[in-house]
Amino acid sequence: MELIPIVNQIFSLLTVAGQIIVAVLIVSLATKRSEILNFFAEHAFVFSLTVALIATLGSLFYSEIAGYEPCKLCWFQRILMYPQVILLGIAWLKKDNSIVLYSIVLSSLGALIAGYNYLLQIGLAPAIGCSVVGYSINCAQRFVMQFGYITIPMMALTAFLLIISFMTIFKRSSLSPLIK
């Protein structure tokens, strides 16, 4: 299918952009660059919702259109990402800030699983409980390898880290009633 290489390139570029944003946010937190932090705090919910939606649509593209069978770890990552589209969407529409901690927790668990899945794929972690099971492929199998390091779990890891970053910056900002 000719669409798959194009989508791989788009998602890989989005992943690199996301990694740059995470790095900028970490440096901004360390150096207390309030103008950058305030911008991302003001838009944290819409940015997080956008990331969760793109990640969800991406995973559905890979499984339903490209035909890549999700592994057991991919299913856990989906379980932690998919509900965030609905939860962040409702929170954004209702201007309900109480979801911040829940989103950070879901994304942190997802980041741990995606990080482990990535390490499996590049051969740096043992396959504990991730052998082929009846409905799933081996978690170390790579369907995508772009720019020499970007795989589907790296895309997911970046998405989870972006959401963690946006929500953390929001939580630390003066916009969050949870801090006051």
Image (cartoon, helix red, strand yellow):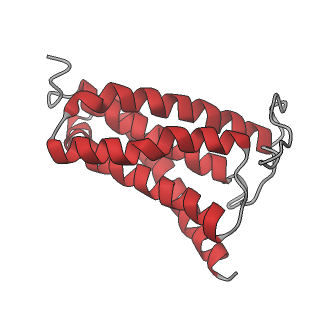
Number of marks:
0
Q: Residue furthest bottom?
A: 2
Residue 134 to residue 110: above or below: below
The foreground one among 109 and 122 is 109
For the C terminus, give its image quadrant.
top left
Residue under the image location 50 percent in, 29 percent down: 108
Image coords of residue 168 (percent x, y) = 34, 29
Residue under the image location 53 percent in, 55 percent down: 15
Residue 90 to residue 66: above or below: above
Image coords of residue 129 (percent x, y) = 81, 30
Image coords of residue 60 (percent x, y) = 56, 60
Q: Residue furthest front?
A: 134
Image coords of residue 158 (percent x, y) = 53, 45
Residue 21 to residue 177: above or below: below
The foreground one among 111 and 70 is 70
Horizontal side of 169 relative to 26 (left or right) equals: left
Q: Residue furthest top?
A: 180
Residue under the image location 74 percent in, 37 percent down: 119
Residue 169 shows in this picture: yes
User: Quadrant of the rendered structure where residue 111 is?
Assistant: top right
Horizontal side of 81 relative to 154 (left or right) equals: left
For the N terminus, give its image quadrant.
bottom right
The foreground one among 99 and 10 is 99
Horizontal side of 57 relative to 36 (left or right) equals: right
The foreground one among 51 and 21 is 51
Residue 118 shows in this picture: no
Residue under the image location 40 percent in, 40 percent down: 163
